[in-house]
Image (tube, rainbow, N blue to C red):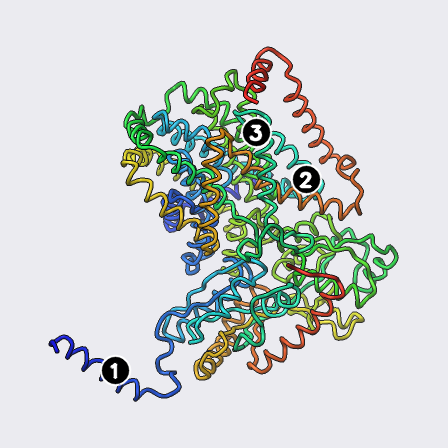
Amino acid sequence: MSMNNKIAGVVAGALLVAAGLMPASGLAQYPTKPVRLIVAFPAGGSTDIIARLVAQRLGEKLGQQVIVDNRGGAGGTIGTEIAAKATPDGHTLTMGTTSTHVIAPAAYAKVNYDPVKDFEPITLVASTPYLLVLHPGVKANNLKEFVALAKSQPGKLNYASAGTGSTTQLAMEMLNRAAGMDIVHIPYSGNGPAGAAALGGQVQALFGSMPAVLPHAQAGRLRPIAVGTSKRSPALPNVPTVAESGYPGFEVSLWLGFFAPKGTPKAVLSRLQKELVAIANSPDMAAQFEKNGASAVTNTPAEMTALMKTELDKYGKVIKAAGIQLK
Amino acid sequence: METDIIQNLALGFSTAVSPINLFYCFIGVLVGTLIGVLPGIGPVAAVAMLLPLTFNLDAVGAIIMLSGIYYGTQYGGSTTAILVNLPGESASVVTCMDGYAMARIGRAGPALAIAAIGSFFAGTVGTILVALVGPPLAEIALKFGAPEYFSLMVMALIAAAVLAHGGMLKTICMIVLGLLVGIVGTDVNSGMSRFTFGASGLADGLSFVVVAMGLFGFAEILSNLQDKADTASRDILNQKITGLMPTAKDMKDSFGAILRGTAIGAFFGTLPGGGPTISAFSAYAVEKKMAKNPENFGKGDIRGVAAPESANNAAVQCAFITTLTLGIPHGATMALLLGALTIQGIAPGPQVMTQRPDLFWGLIASMWIGNAMLVILNLPLVGLWIKLLKVPYRFLYPAIMVFMAIGVYSVNNLDLDIYMTILFGILGYIFMKLKCEPAPLILAFVLGPLMEENLRRALLISRGDPTVFITRPISAAFLVATALLLAFMIVPSFRKKREEAVAESATL
């Protein structure tokens, strides 16, 4: 045995002993390298912005960088699939949303992951409301008048969406059904073009994501008539909710939360849960979210699973009724 | 009103010329240029990669630096288009045609210089336009609905047929092929996949970078390598470089082209969607139509570089109009810039102008400063880029291929994109052998999906009534212009035109 091999043997032995002394949970070693946070949407989008805000703070708390890895495409299913199949050691996380973990699995004919079985939910961090806005030329000042207008001329009004199968479509389809309206869906490619169509009066209505339409509502270019959340938005305290306008139980919002691949050690998950809840609830982060039209929301893994199951059922019905199927 | 604008611009310049903002602008332009010359890395990839760098800057600094990166990358993209036939983005596809031809006859220097000069002129005009009439122009852009966009794109595609130096039939075939390639991906209306063969990487369609890098860059390398003699001749070719700067005749020739290119770019640039691409192609088409010697185009005519480069830059500048005044992004790069604003806690939208005048006017002022820096930075760099051409091809091409692969991969982080690039490279090589111009294919590939989207959207809104295209005045005007264009091409009227037509039918 050469000298080098002897040293190697001693080192290996010492390492084994050290490993034996570590707590069985494996927590002390986490994180041993930078953590990858997969965002299934392109850089600069609303999901990406929230992810980056949280990632930076999480990195400081963990003592390791949290690197945002944008894996956009196919409605967020490409990146989410990569996250589902990543090594479950806590070094790969993903920012899941209503789109990736509810709508895509319900609307796509085939998705290569199961939102409930393939992931360990950690916590929600934020949610974004949806706001029903009208072109100012439309003769309706509230939801009641708008429903009456739509019913007086069935099949004549149009609404824009950010794309087939997007939350902006599903929100309006839910309202169509709840109110017995027949407003026609005109899909656009993203929130920007959909907003432009509403601004230019190409369509009469848009159930848009709050950050995309709020500036126009505030500038008086679009008329906000209802918010889709169960409570009024602090940004627009005078705008009633859809629920209080006569459709109790109506709720559409986009939530964003952290997920780890199934099988990630329990100790790692609870550490992340603790840190992420603290980050999301910190006053300055809440202020940052607010600026982006979102609000901080946190919960427990069990609550997240329950939320996904309820929403898979709720959106599944709308998707089926509206005949949406993505392939 | 006028004093307002002067006051506003004064506020803008006082913001932009603070040493720290000048520094951010310079860093942006420099980094942008350096990244832009890497083949395959266009503005979208560069801005996305560098976005996190700006998170810790203040809002004004961040947006100024990002716009600098945007201009820089764009200019860098034109540099590779001219030197090695690699367009960085769809608009520089046009620059490839005569820019690369100029490089092959040893005139890469003047081509690079005229691109910088034309871009600067167009950028200056664009900046003034944004400052003067930005907000009202944005309102006009909003009047453009689906029927208007559709008719505009029909016109652009027909205009593309003028581009080809080959026969009309070949051009039409390339356009149709481009439309087909553009169909790949998810249909916006039904959400169904088309021609994706079950590959999720194709669900969002083929990316421009893949198609352009393959058809232009990769195919060019294949053809250069096909035999030893050719590689050697390429090396020799590059040794006899004549003059770095444009001659007086070059400047005189380009003057009109730059003016017309700027006007065309400013017009199309304000319309969201396809602006820079349509304007570069249209500017080239107009120059070729107006030229006394159109047969020179495609063989290294300096006007074929000056016009599209000016048009492209004017369009980019005007693209800021809708992005800034309405908060509506004008394509992927603009969406990223708006994202950067949002990260800074500024909700992009009409209020930015009133709530953050320092930011709005500071950005407008720094647009001009950025353009000026590009010229100052790039004219001396021309010599350096030319030296790059003197690197023996056996060293140059593997480097290009590696960077190309990195660039293509960086767009979506998908390895499938690299394989697709190889596929398009082989296709491009076949086109080269068949003497088919790939440029019309690229234009159709970019415009096709937009055209289909708007056609179907127009018909959805009109509930299936096709007369909507002729009853809406703006749309009708575009269609009439298209008809005139077609008549112009099909009826070979006068002397020179007849000669051309004869030459064309001979090649068919």
Instruction: Please identify the quadrant where the N terminus of chain B is shown.
Output: top right
Looking at the rendered structure, the secondary structure element under dot 3 is helix
Q: Is residue A123 left or right of residue A227?
A: left
Callouts 1 and 3 on one subunit: no
**Badge 1 sits on which subunit?**
A
Q: What chain does mark 3 sit on?
A: B
User: Which residue, given by chain and number where applicable, does mark 1 sit on?
Assistant: A15
SS at mark 2 in the image? helix
Q: Is residue B163 above or below residue A12?
A: above
Residue occupied by mark 2: B150
Q: CA distance from mark 3 to mark 2?
A: 24 Å
Left or right, B68 with respect to A32, comes to: right
- Mark 2 near mark 1, Cβ–Cβ under 8 Å? no
Q: Which mark is residue B432?
A: none
Please state which amino acid type lies under the numbered disc 3.
Lys
**What is the three-letter code of the residue carrying label 2?**
Phe
**What residue is pinned by disc 3?**
B170
Q: Tag 2 or tag 3, which sits nearer the N-term? A: 2
* Left or right of A211, for residue A28: left
Viewer can see residue B270: no
Contact? badges 1 and 3 (CB < 8 Å): no
Task: Give the crowd class for mark 2: few <14, some 14-19, many >=20 residues within 10 Å.
Answer: many
The amino acid marked with disc number 1 is Leu
Identify the image quadrant of the C terminus of chain B.
Answer: top right
Q: Residue at x 43, y 38 (%)?
A: B219
Q: Position of residue B275 (x, y in %)?
A: 57, 39
